[in-house]
Image (spheres, grey):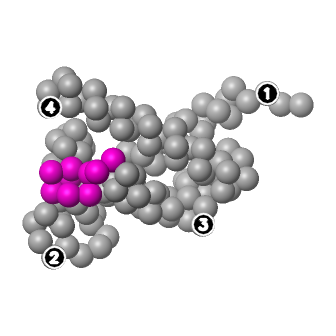
Amino acid sequence: MDAHARQQFDFLLNAAIERFVERCEQRCGGPVPALARLRDDPNAEGVWVDEFVQALFRDFLLDSADGAAFVLQALARRPVPVITTPANSIGDFMQRLAEQAFAQVLARKTEEALEQRLAFQVTD
């Protein structure tokens, strides 16, 4: 992946992490329950990582075969995720694969961000 494309992907991932952490904390009532729900089930009530990734891909115009190729190129060294929804075409398959791969990375990085917040949280 070219350096400029890598920079764009890193920006996308960091923006997604920031947004997703905030969303999980608000919907789950703080970092502790958010982290617990995320670890238990990334698609649990208030977390919904798959739904978030689909919306993010739409917002960043990645909901196409070209967008999927961009994401897959950035995640090329990661293990192949299990596709949980059927695909009707090669482009659709690429989209599902990119969403699942991105969701896995996002969930892991969100866990790390929530753990960091908890580590530096001031207690009364």
Q: Where is 45 relative to 110, above or below?
A: below
Asked if the stretch drawn in magenta spans residue 112, the answer is: no
Residue under pointer 1: 122
Q: Which quadrant of the view contains residue 114?
A: top right
In the image, the segment drawn in magenta is 60-68
Compared across the picture, whether 19 is left or right of 5 comes to right
Name above or below for residue 100 compared with residue 87: above
Give the residue type that dot 2 points to. Asn
Label tally: 4
Nearest the eye: 8 or 21: 8
Instruction: From the viewer's perspective, tell me whether residue 90 is left or right of residue 24.
Output: left
- Residue 100's spot in the image, x, y percent? 32, 57
Residue 73 percent coordinates (x, y):
17, 42
Q: Residue 1, labelled with which disc?
A: 4
Q: Earlier in the sequence, mark 4 or mark 2?
A: 4
- Three-letter amino acid code at disc 4? Met
The residue wearing badge 3 is: 45
